Image (cartoon, grey):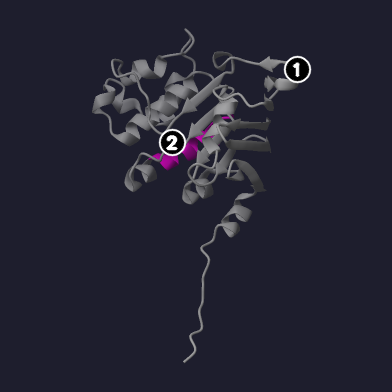
Amino acid sequence: MLTVRCKGTIGTFSISADIEAGVGVTAIHGPSGAGKSTILRAIAGLWHPLEGYIRVGDNVLLDTQNGINLATKNRRLGVVFQRPLLFPHLSVADNLRFGMSRRETGFDGVVGMLDLGGILDRMPKNLSGGEAQRVALGRAILADPQILLLDEPLTGLDDERRSQVLPYLERLRDETTIPIVYVSHHRDEIMQLADLIFTIEGGTVKQELTPREFELSTLPKIVTRLDSA
């Protein structure tokens, strides 16, 4: 269970969110600059709202009323950004192992799920964009997160590579029990992955939608015009 209630400002821009979600993929959808990533940063402890309450499962990450604000390193997060941010001096295998406990429980399963077995010895500079993003996903999962935060993870990829990575995100959703918050302005990604969608506009979360409701609300509008002679 995820609860995010927060209000605050960044300069003159106001943020207001009220989100309640269960397991699966919770998507936050809206145009660029709407505040999607700021909400993710609040969950991660990288932005501190003036008023807020954030809980993941039984763990309270932020409660401004009671003076609780866990440091990012103590929030058990897995985070993947638009750019993979891999360590350039480490091989794929060593990037995946970074941050793991001494026991490599789950390593082989994650490698198999993301189809990384053939590139474990490669260095990041020799990876395609899609391969690098899969490695970043694997590293985030192997950190044993309580929640996975994906911030526009496919935006930097071309259409072909996006279509290659999306099935792995589906496997991640279907084969793990890690709750996922997925930020994107791409309708097709949201349609394919999300169990619950929150829309945001101008810094304010506006709607909570099921995938079907989201599909209907985002259908292209057909405009007809009757020209009179």
The residue type indicated by label 1 comes to: Asn
Picture quadrant where residue 157 is located:
top left
Dot 1 corresponds to which residue?
66
Q: At 64% from the left edge and 49% from the top edge, which residue is drawn?
A: 210
Q: Between tags 2 and 1, which lies in front?
A: 1
Q: Say whether residue 85 is visible.
A: yes
In the picture shown, does residue 176 fall above or below 220? above
Task: Locate residue 137 relative to residue 9 in the image: left or right.
Answer: left
Compute the Cα span from label 2 to label 1.
Answer: 34 Å
Identity, as a three-letter code, of the amino acid under mark 2: Pro
Q: Earlier in the sequence, mark 2 or mark 1?
A: 1
Above or below 94: residue 115: below
Give the answer, above or below, for where 161 lies relative to 48: below
Q: Where is residue 174 in the image (x, y as percent from the top left)?
A: 54, 37
Residue 56 visible in rendering: no
Q: Which residue corresponds to the image point at 38% horizontal and 28% vertical from the top-left?
A: 84
Query: Is residue 38 magenta-colored?
Result: no
Disc number for residue 153: 2
